[in-house]
Image (cartoon, rainbow, N blue to C red):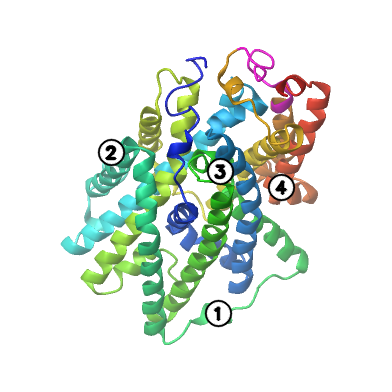
């Protein structure tokens, strides 16, 4: 193995350390899925015109769909014990893998900052309630635009994340196992409180769909499903970072099936129930669980609930937004960047992007954000699955993945077939994205439909074009057997 392509964190996990059971994998997903974005996931769908049950179907369907590439890309991780950026070398090349890995890593850095701000907000909310702080009277820090107490709460939660980054994967495994049942119990208790206070499920359950035409509904439905797929399209790529620790394929497949779609649907349902009840309890629909908890009226119950939200955000942030960029940055310079250092780079970027400013975007930013980056990640997933399952028939020469001059070197370390397939697969979604962010004033309706299904379009084109381009440039396929 070439030292420029490996270190202790990127090397294959030995069999003795592949100890994650079905429950560990399921707990991983429960811990990641139970978070504030999941709680509020149905809000944009309902405000966009859907009824509560239509929104819930969209959430469930999107997560069932994304489970397919999730389990497929997890297979090589479990089979060979290799992480995501190393697996990318088979299709993108030993150096080209950095292109796809960094695209995934940059998205994770953005999410890390956002989730850290949300966790810090839960800490701030707890302290503000205990000490009767008034945000309207607080002085805002120059440049940052937030109060000193808010920034201190943000940094406190940031440091808590750093502790788990420094302790490594075993601490993450412990965190997910601990938090999964705790978070589910707290969610059920919050729902029970809301139903009891409202004497029922509230008016949202009687609210019908408000779409004027079936075409409007199906466009929103397509965009909603794509957004749900986009929510975990990041993890559908770097799932080998976790599945490499699984005991066997059965553990990773069943664990993910148990942990992902049911939890996402259930926690979104809790968000719908509680929000619907707030219309009766407080006279308005409140989708932000932090605000709901602050209005409960019992300092003890509110503190427990806010601590639960902080734990939920921590478990999601560490697993979903640290592990991947830590390995991705390590893949850039394995000799100098370990998992710890890569994780700390992610954490520092999470501060520099000032996530509280990202969250000032207009309503619907999640859909622009989710569908936008799914247009980038869908093609990568298609290329990876086509390479591993169709071309290589699940066979990899693991030692060659760690050699500068080997069968996965392609052209100077870059796979032209994969990179060209990626660019061509992203291109059809570009007009829709530019229109979404108001760079283009108007585009044809058919381009809007393409963008509404960005992940699916990108995945299909990446899958097919990679197979075509690999036929033209079959380097490393015949030599890998």
Q: Earlier in the sequence, mark 3 or mark 2?
A: 2
1 vs 4, front mark: 4
1 vs 3, front mark: 3
What number is the disc on residue 142? 2
Disc 1 and disc 4 in contact, CB within 8 angstroms: no
Q: Is residue 241 magenta?
A: no
- Magenta residues span 405-418
Residue 298 in picture, x, y percent from top left: 24, 74
Q: Mark 1 falls on what kind of element?
A: helix
Q: Which residue is mark 3?
A: 234
Q: Earlier in the sequence, mark 2 or mark 1?
A: 2
Q: Mark 4 falls on what kind of element?
A: helix
What number is the disc on residue 205? 1
Disc 3 and disc 2 in contact, CB within 8 angstroms: no
- Structural distance between the alpha carbons of marks 1 and 4: 31 Å
4 vs 2, front mark: 4
- Asked whether, in this view, residue 138 is left or right of residue 186, the answer is left
**Viewer-closest of 42 and 20:** 20
Q: Earlier in the sequence, mark 3 or mark 4?
A: 3
Disc 3 and disc 4 in contact, CB within 8 angstroms: no
Q: Which residue is mark 4?
A: 456
- Asked whether, in this view, residue 132 is left or right of residue 455, the answer is left
Judged from this view, the residue extending furthest toward the bottom is 199
Q: Earlier in the sequence, mark 1 or mark 3?
A: 1
| Figure quadrant of residue 440 | top right
């Amino acid at each position: 193995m070439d030292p420029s392509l490996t270190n202790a964190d990127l090397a294959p996990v030995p069999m003795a350390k592949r100890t994650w059971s079905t429950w560990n994998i399921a707990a991983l997903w429960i811990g990641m899925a139970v978070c504030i974005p999941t709680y509020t996931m149905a809000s944009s769908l309902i405000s966009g015109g859907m009824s509560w049950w239509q929104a819930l179907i969209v959430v469930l369907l999107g997560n069932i769909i994304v489970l397919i590439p999730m389990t497929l890309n997890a297979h090589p991780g479990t089979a060979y014990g290799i992480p995501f950026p190393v697996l990318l070398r088979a299709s993108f090349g030993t150096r080209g893998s950095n292109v796809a890995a960094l695209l995934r890593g940059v998205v994770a850095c953005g999410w890390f900052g956002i989730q850290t701000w949300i966790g810090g907000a839960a800490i701030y909310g707890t302290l503000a309630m205990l000490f009767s702080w008034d945000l309207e009277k607080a002085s805002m820090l120059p440049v940052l635009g937030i109060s000193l107490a808010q920034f201190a709460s943000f940094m406190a939660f940031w440091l808590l994340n750093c502790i788990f980054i420094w302790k490594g994967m075993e601490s993450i495994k412990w965190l997910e196992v601990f938090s999964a049942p705790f978070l589910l119990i707290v969610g059920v208790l919050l729902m029970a409180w809301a139903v009891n206070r409202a004497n029922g499920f509230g008016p949202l359950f009687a609210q019908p769909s408000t779409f004027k035409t079936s075409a409007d509904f199906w466009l929103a439905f397509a965009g909603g499903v794509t957004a749900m797929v986009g929510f975990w399209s990041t993890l559908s790529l770097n799932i080998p970072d976790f599945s490499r620790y699984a005991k066997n394929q059965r553990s990773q497949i069943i664990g993910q099936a148990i942990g992902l779609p049911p939890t996402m649907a259930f926690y979104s349902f809790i968000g719908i129930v509680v929000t619907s009840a707030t219309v009766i309890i407080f006279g308005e629909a409140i989708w932000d669980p932090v605000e709901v908890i602050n209005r409960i009226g019992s300092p003890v119950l509110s503190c427990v609930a806010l601590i639960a939200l902080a734990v939920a955000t921590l478990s999601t942030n560490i697993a979903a937004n640290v592990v991947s960029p830590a390995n991705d940055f390590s893949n850039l310079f394995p000799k100098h960047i370990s998992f710890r250092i890569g994780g700390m780079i992610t954490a520092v970027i999470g501060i520099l992007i000032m996530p509280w400013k990202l969250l000032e975007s207009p309503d619907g930013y999640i859909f622009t954000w989710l569908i936008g980056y799914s247009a980038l990640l869908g093609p990568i997933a298609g290329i990876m699955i086509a390479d591993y399952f169709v071309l290589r028939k699940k066979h990899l020469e693991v030692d060659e993945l760690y050699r500068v001059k080997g069968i996965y070197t392609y052209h100077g370390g870059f796979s032209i077939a994969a990179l060209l397939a990626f660019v061509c697969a992203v291109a059809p979604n570009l007009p829709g994205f530019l229109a979404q962010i108001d760079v283009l004033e108007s585009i044809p309706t058919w381009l809007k439909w393409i963008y509404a299904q960005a992940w699916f379009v990108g995945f299909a084109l990446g899958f097919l074009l990679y197979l075509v381009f690999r036929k033209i440039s079959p380097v490393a396929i015949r030599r890998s057997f």
